[in-house]
Image (cartoon, grey):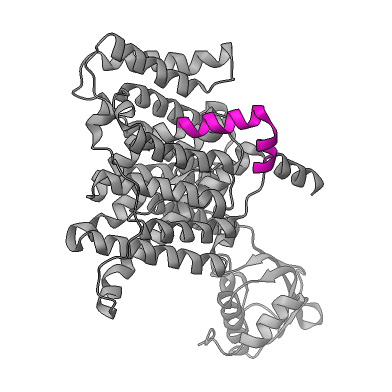
Amino acid sequence: MTGAAEVDRSHSIWAALKSPKRLRVEALAGIVVALALIPEAIAFSIIAGVDPRVGLFASFTMAVSIAFLGGRPAMISAATGAIALVIAPVVREYGLDYLIATVILGGVLQIVLGLIGVAKLMRFIPRSVMVGFVNALAILIFTSQITHLTDVPFAVYPLAALGLAIIFLFPRLTKVVPAPLVSIVLLTIITVAASIAVPTVGDEGELPDSLPELLIPDVPWTLETLRIIFPFALTMALVGILESLLTAKLVDDITDTHSNKTRETWGQGASNIITGFFGGMGGCAMIGQTMINVKASGARTRLSTFLAGIFLLILVVALGDIVAIIPMAALVAVMIFVSWATFDWHSIHPSTLRRMPKSETTVMLSTVVVTVWTHNLAYGVGVGVLVAMVLFAHRVAHFTRVTRLDASDEDNKRVYRVEGELFFASSNDLVYQFDYTGDPTEIVIDMSRAHVWDASTIASLDAVRHKYETKGKKVTITGMDAASSARHDRLSGNLGGGH
């Protein structure tokens, strides 16, 4: 505990402010993230069907708010594609005001879910699902850049290649300045100095020239409005929580530190409420920008997240003309690098695949395939968890064994010993493990090496007892542990298992 506390203190804002070296790392990381956020926010605004300023302001307010409210230092939250896909139908059918109302309600639901402990459900997400989640996101990050490499001037390709070369090679010279920032600056200078005509950030959409303003959505405060926005708000809340908590767990692993998942959950909600009241489209954690911040730039504190939001606002409002000339090739190179760095290459190495149980690989692949196919992380993770549950139940079901301890009918008694974890999958064929006709009149079922988990098992035991009783034989169940005995006493005879 002491070591963990020391790590946490070394990654605090105060520690960063006292250390010029750490402060420089956090500030430069914030600049790189801000630059990477701009085209993403504009793209997600287009997906949602709103003006680019709605996505840009959402990214600003989310980043600044979560820097104070979130439970995972150095994680970046902003407007995301997952949220954009969820809320797009609201804008299409009802307009921007209903979108803002949906974002605010989604934030309220996230706070409620956070306070009732939904973050604790993270423990039920297997590692193989986490690996699939990471690999799927890496693939989606890469494929999202293809549009910027299709039907573009030829100069885009050598520029993107040069950008990647700088990002990969520059750290060998020095790590004082983040390589992605160097790549963006150098490629911008080259394109401007050489007058190379390639797509720029300005081509993605008009940048705002004013600060966001506080507003109240102009919607009727009625049950009908609630009926319209509640399904979208709930979906947004769940998708946002899922993506944020999975990203937080990934950052925990990278930084060897622990985050407060409950705080992150309600912090996301509070940030979405703030974002809604400032006219933003809502958002959640972004794995791509988080990897830029944590892995590529070395940031570790909330300061980098806060500065990313501040720099974003400064760049788009005060320095919009400069930002507009940044070639998209530079940002594409950064995101391709992020994709490469995010992917868990070890998970697909032949030696890993040979050692890994096929069930684990199946869970990982199902998560990847569904996520990439639907572009929805919630679907992918949901399917991955479901597949993991089914495979686990199937595997555990074979660990149950019924053994006949004596081979003779001496003393007119037959003893059976049941071993293993008994639940719906493993206890279904329990009734077929006994010799109802050939056994003597007194049957003892020894449960000292078994544990009863559910009503299905109680029903199976009742069925065994009933089959013996119809033949005039007595059954005695012995050796149950306290929990199994209490469950058996409460449910036995009340489930209709023997009828």
User: Observer-nearest residue: 469 or 305?
Assistant: 305
In the image, taking residue 247 as reference, residue 422 lies left or right, namely: right
Image x and y of residue 28, in percent: 53, 29
Can residue 271 be seen here? The reply is yes
Image x and y of residue 341, in percent: 50, 28
User: Observer-nearest residue: 230 or 416?
Assistant: 230
In the image, taking residue 129 as reference, residue 476 lies left or right, namely: right
Residue visible at 22% across and 30% down in the picture = 203
Can residue 376 be seen here? The reply is no
Residue visible at 44% across and 50% down in the picture = 62
In the image, taking residue 25 as reference, residue 109 lies left or right, namely: left
Dominant secondary structure, magenta: helix
Q: Residue furthest top?
A: 194
Image quadrant assignment for residue 398: bottom right
Above-or-below relation of 146 to 91: above
State which region is magenta.
11-32
Q: Is residue 28 magenta?
A: yes
Image quadrant assignment for residue 175: top right
Image x and y of residue 30, in percent: 50, 34
